[in-house]
Every structure is written in C-alpha cells, then in structure tokens.
Amino acid sequence: MSNNQVLDFKENSVLPKLRFTEFEQEAQWEIKNLANIATFLKGKGISKADIDETGVIPCIRYGELYTTYNEIIDKVLSKTNIPTNNLILSKKNDVIIPSSGETHEDIAKASCVMLDDIALGGDLNIIRSHENGVFISYYLNSSLKSEISKIAQGNAVVHLYANQLKKLEIALPSPSEQGKIVNCLSSLDKVIESASIKLKLYIDHRTGMLQQLFPKDKENLPKLRLGKFSQEWENIELSQIAKPVKKKNSNEDKLKVLSLSNEHGLVSQADYFLKRVAGDNTDRYIVLQKNDFVYNDRITKNSTYGTIKRLSLYESGIVSPIYKCFRFEKNQDPVFWEYFFESKTHESEIKQIVNEGARAGRYNISIDKFLSINVMQPSLLEQEKIASCLTSLDHLISHQKNYIDKLKRHKKGLMQQLFPVVEEI
C-alpha cells in the first residue's frame, strides 16, 4: 500500500488516503449515487416469537445486525417456519441495513448477505446491486457512517428510509480493486473472529474453574484441588475471619469517592462519573483501605444479594453509607475470598437470610446478618494457590480482550483510509 497525493482530480472522482500499490496508476474512484447502482426493498416482519429452533427457513432480524453479524453474513443462526409467500427472501450479494434503531450512530450498521433465500425481517432496508455487496457494506460502515447518521430521522426511535439511502453518494474503484480491499478487510475480520473464539474459550474455562475450585452447597471439598492438599475445608461463620468496617470519614483528606459497579468493581467517581469530590458532603462516608469488601444490601426479590466487590484499584477511598463494608483478618487471602463470593458457594446461606428479612418486596441484609453466614475455609496456602490460578486466568482474559480491541481499532483506522469521504472533495 502507499499514500496518495494526487493534484489533478477529474470531475466526479476521488481517491482514498491509502491505496494498494498495484492500483496506483489506475483511474480514480468514480462517484455515483446509490440510486443509480442499486434497487431498494424492505424486509417483511419476523417477530421474536416467530424464531423457531426447528424452523426450516433461515432468517435475519434487524436486531441481529447489532448483536450477531459483521459486514459479511455467510452463516445464518436463526430460523423460522413462516410460509415463504409471507416473506422477503434474499439474493446473494444483498446489503442490509436497519430501518430503525436507538441512536443515529448505531443505525449505520450494514451487512452483506452472501446466501440466497434468507428471510429478511421487517425494519431492514435491502440494497440490491450488481456491484460488490461486501465492498458496499464495508463502505457504509466506515466513511459513509457519519453521512447515514445525518440523514436518519427521529430521537427516541431513529428511522432510516430507502428514499434517504438513495441520495447517498459512493465512490467506486474497479472491480479488482474492490475485491482487493474486501480480501484485506475480511482477512482481518477472520483474525478478529479467531481471537474472539479464543477469548470465549478462556471465559468458559474460567467459569468451569470457579465451579470446580470451590465446594458445592453442603459439600466440604471442591471437585478440583491444586497441588497436594488433603486437609478438609473448615466450615466456619464468616464473622470469625471478617469484621465490619464502619469508620466514618473526617473529611480532612480528599480521599477518592468510590462507587460500586458490576463491571468495574469499586471505582473512583472522579474517573467513572467524571466529577470531583470537592464540595460534596462526605462526612458520613465510610473509609476503606485496599482489599476491603463492599456490597449493596438493597436487593430485589429475584436476586440473592447485591454485587460484592473488593477494593483493588486504589490504596484507600470512601464509599456512601448505603453500602455495607467488611474486612478480612490478616491471615486470610482477600483475593481468594473475592473469587469465593463470585463462585456463589455461599448462595444458600444468603437465600436463607433474604427469606427471613423480606419486607415490602425489598430485602436488606445487614452487615451482622451477612457475616453470620457459614463459609468453607481452606488453609491459607490453598487459598493463595487458588487465587493465583484464577488471577493468572483473569490476566490472560484481559490480555486477549485488549488484543481484540487493538485489532478492532486497527480495522477502524484502516477502513477510514481505504474508503474516501465523498463530501470532503
């Protein structure tokens, strides 16, 4: 590939920022109106209730473009039994794009269907063309994304109509250059897909390890033990090894105000909510130190307890008194206990407390009640072994996620350079 600096542009033509070397001497990309190279159709309603695992007709619903498919659809997951005379069926090379969505940005999500006779659901615009459909889908998802978001209409629900799509201008190179670009990006997509499959295997393995490294309810030993441990785990009350944290903030120091997040754990509001502590009244907030635990005691009828998280990102901080906080003794490994709570080994104990404390559809677990549950405790050495194993696995998962994010950023940057923005010319 090479960067291009072309001064003598022909009328109605354009060049991308990045072009494959073998096409440098070829003609510039010709700008065409989508209405001149394609016909437009609309999918026909397939509701969620119409999806049937035993169905005989493969189908695509518009929501799956956001959750399941990328630019190329060569395998369809959903099926239906709706009679074919009530459906709109695909032709290989059709490009589909939602006709409704939640935001202007999200609605610009195109895919090319590489299969015939796929039922295309309602809320799908269908662009049928003799041009390379995969090339068009990549183009729509890159340089034309902002243009599509501009022409989409609505606020709470955003709509995109065929008459609007027809007005879009797209620049087309020769078929061979289109194919080269498609091969480049689809190869990168395969790398991303392979990395994503590997990530799922890591996550599934982690789930299995959590199930095997901790005893099931009413059992004294886990299915899997790391190393030559033979001592039985001890059934004790949690209060024997953990104590409440109730120290109130003096507000003399500007400690980080922490908030409980399901995804991120205990995080600073300055980072997470983009606001600062200065001026907030935090006198009644509870002072935490690293490795302290926090849970939300306000839970609903269908859950067993609120999120339990360990302070791991910071050395100290303060949390709202709506949270309940506790700290393990020094002869315990807090990382082990974080995984212990995640494993749900203590779930039956919590359920018993919840049932006892039911009140007006909401359930509160006091810190004393929580610390009264029975837990299975291994030796400190075995705690450390289990914590080390799961921490290593979490690092592996984190590394894989970062790798996938880098690949996706690389793809996005590559697409921005491979496809010209017509409106800038």
Image: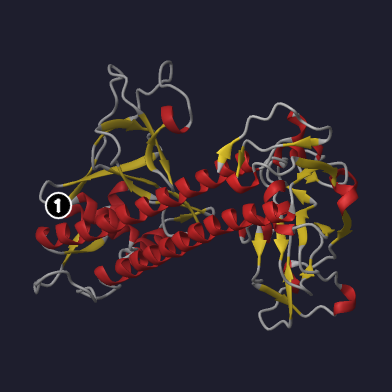
Dot 1 alpha-carbon crowd within 10 angstroms: few under 14, some 14 to 19, many 20 or more: some
Provide residue 17's location: percent of width, then percent of height: 62, 35
- Quadrant of the image containing the C terminus: top right
Is residue 343 placed above or below 310 in the rendered structure? Answer: below
Q: Nearer the viewer, residue 323 or 50?
A: 50
Q: Amino acid at mark 1?
A: Gln
Residue 307 in view (yes/no): yes
The part of the image, by quadrant, that contains residue 285 is: top left
Residue 66: horizontal and vertical position, in percent? 65, 55
Instruction: Residue 111: name its quadrant.
Output: bottom right
Compared to 11, does 176 lie above or below? below
Can you name the residue that lies furthest to the front here?
A: 25
In which quadrant is the N terminus drawn?
top right
The correct choice, above or below, for 417 with respect to 360 in the image is above
* Image side of residue 244 versus residue 19, left or right: left
Asked whether residue 302 appears in the rendered view, the answer is no
Residue bearing mark 1 = 332
Colouring: secondary structure
Residue at 72 percent across and 60 percent down: it is 112
- In x, y percent, where is residue 266? 36, 40
Identity of the residue drawn at 51% across and 44% down = 410
Q: Nearer the viewer, residue 343 or 2?
A: 2
Q: Is residue 384 left or right of residue 92?
A: left
Nearer to me, 124 or 20: 20
Residue 10 versus residue 200: which sits nearer the camera? 10
Helix, strand or loop under label 1? loop
